[in-house]
Amino acid sequence: MNAELEKKILSETEEKMKKAVEVMEREFAKIMATRVTPEILDPVKVEAYGTLMPLKQVATVVSPKPRLLVVEPWDKSLLKEIERAILKANLGVTPQSDGTTITLPFPKLTEEERQRFVVQVKKLAEEFREEVRAIRRDEIEKIKTMEKNKEISEDDKFRLQEKIQQLTEKYIDIIDDRLEKKEKEILEV
């Protein structure tokens, strides 16, 4: 097997695993912890210009304090629609408008809420571990097919399978590490 083909297979596999971790991190960012991030408003859709649009396409969202978000619409005529969309999203916060911006003061989490969020991130992490394992399974199937079609030798197949297993372990360790950090962040009072 030429080194170019091996490098291509491993590179594509790693890229897929890396993307899975990036998606997981975006999902983690939507889960409230001690610091509220603008990503928590990603699911909010605003009725604007005759269509439903993501909030971040009609306003700037910043987090000046750990438990506060400030939403500044680019078009001030959308202020009421943005307020309505945030209330409809049922985020557990009441928007407060001053006529130009909307502030969202998030309350401190109760112990029960923290535990619920921990369960949620653990479930998410397991879903992404399964995703990484599915990538491994798919890539190993491709390698077996290549061997069956005499594109690679049996030794090449075993070597690639071992390297893909090492990538799988690396990315599962990364997921576990991110999970541990997010848990600590959630449980921090």
Image (spheres, helix red, strand yellow):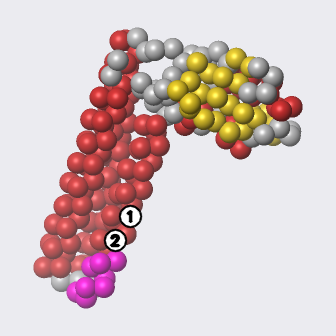
Q: Which numbered circle lies on residue 15?
A: 1
Secondary element at image label 2: helix
Residue holding disc 2: 11
Q: Position of residue 36 (x, y in %)?
A: 50, 28
Counting from the top left corner in percent of width and height, residue 26 is at 47, 43
Q: If the image is split into quadrants, where does the N terminus sit? A: bottom left
Question: Can you see residue 7?
Answer: yes
Instruction: Tell me what residue is drawn at x 42 percent, y 26 percent.
Output: 33
Residue range in magenta is 1-8
User: In the figure, 43 relative to 173: above or below?
Assistant: above
Q: Is residue 3 magenta?
A: yes
Q: Please tell me how many numbered marks the rendered image carries.
A: 2
Q: Residue furthest front?
A: 64
Q: Could you tell me if residue 133 is visible in this image?
A: no
Mark 2 in CB contact with mark 1 (< 8 angstroms): yes
In which quadrant will I find the C terminus?
top left
Q: Nearer the viewer, residue 54 or 188?
A: 188
Q: Give how far across and how far down residue 78 sits, in percent.
A: 82, 32
Q: Residue at x 39, y 60 (%)?
A: 16
Decide which of 168, 175 is in the foreground and name it. 175
Q: For the point 46% across and 14% down, which residue is it?
A: 108
